[in-house]
Amino acid sequence: MDSLYSVGKSILSRTRENVSRYPRGIKNLFSAATKEVNDIASTPRVLVGKSGRASLYKYNSIGESSHEPILLVPSLINRYYILDLYPGCSLIESLVDNGHDVYLLEWLDPRPQDIYATMEDHILSWMNWAVDETLKHATNRQVHLFGQCMGGTFSTIYTAINPEKIKSLVTLTAPVDFCDDGLLSTWARESSVNMNLMEQQWGMIHHEFLQQSFKVLKPTGVIRKWDTLLSNSWKDEFVHKFCYMERWINDNVSFPAKTYTKYINELYRENRLANGTFTLNEQLIDLSAITCPVLCFTAKGDDIVPPPSAELLIDLVSSKKTRHVELGGGHIGCVVSNRHQKVLWSELDEWLLEDKNEVQNVHVTQ
Amino acid sequence: MFMSLNRKIFDFTLNTTDKIVQPILRDRTYLRMSSFQMNSLLHLQKLVEIQTTKVLKSMNIPTEKTLKGLYQTIYELENHKANCERKINMLELKIKDLETRVGNELPPTLKKRTLTPKRSSIKNHAPSN
């Protein structure tokens, strides 16, 4: 009798709780629909310079820093501000608060003439310019290079070419081995789309095309997204973050087709980077030339860059000090989720502060 | 009770859909079909472009190809400018390096003097009209 009474009581209390959530949820949804996202990417910064598609920014660190600066290289497909979403949910803000000298290479919208921009231009010209400018501006000889997703792959290639300029390499969900069993990799390998014809006809891979291909990865994803919003609509913070995420997801950058063709043909289809046959301006890219400390972040639930695809970097470099950290969440979740981002921030901060001469090989799983 | 049952049915439907759709997305036949469609679209675009170019040329209107040529020139000039800037930067660094080396070899009494001429001193030597 007692147990029946307690079951009844718990059902009643849950029903009351659910009923009380509805007005709040409706209010939150209405405010989300009319909300203007003003404080997106609001960490204060100053423009250092511009060169081609690249612009370099410096974030004002709190207090004087004696460490080497860190240069962030975001993905080329999405906007950089996933690393600086809003106050309290920003990797850049956390680095600045911890006293690091933070520089950011922002990829600008491609201009009409950028249909001729090659991967060589992105890495050897613009990235090289950004690193040199950072070193000049920070009056330092070496820089910590942090690359996210495709920016991570480009940073890895850059470090293999210019190891003397890099203090340490940090990659976040950056593919190195493209021969994984992920859906993107399967599509690139198995499909026979004429990439050269695409390059010739389009000149620029439009962001709508790229966005649709990401959506097809999980066709039920859109339904799940709106369902998650409805079920969590009474949580103020969830709805707040949802608005910012929506803005970021729908704000993509088009991609120069010449770079895209090389990326798909040589990296995805022939897996040249991992095989050691990838070339830039006829210069062979040998990842074993990387001797600086390497920190590699992967995400457990990443369906765009499966963890083994990024993790292989650790095996290919000749660095004495390497560290692999597997974060929770997916490709984006590991950067923005409250739980996982804190691990990312603290691991990165710890890495940047670690003693120069410490030698270790560590594998951490969250 | 009713809500949780609804939720379970909803989740089951989405999971089943995922399970059905995922193998299709990896299927070779499906991929070949979509590649064929994509290639056909690209070829069609190429044919349309050839015809459009012909018509526009006959009407003396600049075509996309003319613009592409211009974009290429702009792009090459920008690259040339960037290369020049890089060379200037390298030369600046070399000059600074040389200056510090020379400065170190000078006797301490002369070290305070700067080796680069001041702008004011250049102005003084400039011919006046």
Image: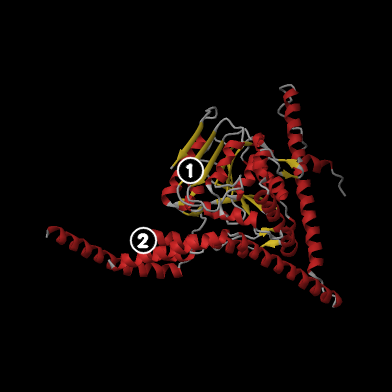
User: In the displayed structure, would residue A14 be above or below residue A103?
Assistant: below
Colour mapping used in the image:
secondary structure
Q: Using the image, name the chain to which the residue with label 1 belongs.
A: A
Residue B37 rendering spot, x and y as whole percentages = 67, 67
Residue B92 rendering spot, x and y as whole percentages = 75, 39
Count all numbered tags in the image, as a single digit.
2
Q: Tag 1: residue type?
A: Glu
Mark nearer the N terminus (1 vs 2) = 2
In terms of depth relative to the viewer, which is nearer, B21 or A176? B21
Determine crowd level at label 1: few under 14, some 14-19, many 20+ residues with C-alpha closer than 10 A: many
Residue located farthest toward the left when viewing the structure as drawn: A1
Residue B23 rendering spot, x and y as whole percentages = 53, 59
Residue B16 sits in quarter:
bottom left
A16 relative to A218 in the view: left or right: left
Determine crowd level at label 2: few under 14, some 14-19, many 20+ residues with C-alpha closer than 10 A: some
Q: Using the image, name the chain to which the residue with label 2 belongs.
A: A
In terms of depth relative to the viewer, which is nearer, A355 or A320? A320
Nearer the observer: mark 1 or 2; the answer is 1
Can residue A162 be seen by looking at this rendering?
Answer: yes
Check the picture and name the quadrant holding the C terminus of chain A. Answer: top left
In terms of depth relative to the viewer, which is nearer, A122 or A5? A5
Can residue A37 be seen by looking at this rendering?
Answer: no
As measured in the structure, the alpha-carbon distance from the residue carrying label 1 to the one carrying label 2 is 28 Å
Residue B38 rendering spot, x and y as whole percentages = 67, 66
Q: Which residue position holds label 2?
A: A235
Q: Tag 2: residue type?
A: Lys
User: Mark 2: which secondary structure?
Assistant: loop
Do discs 1 and 2 belong to a common subunit?
yes
User: In the displayed structure, would residue B78 be above or below residue B88?
Assistant: below
The residue at 51%/48% (across/down) is A92
Q: Which residue position holds label 1?
A: A326
The residue at 59%/32% (across/down) is A319
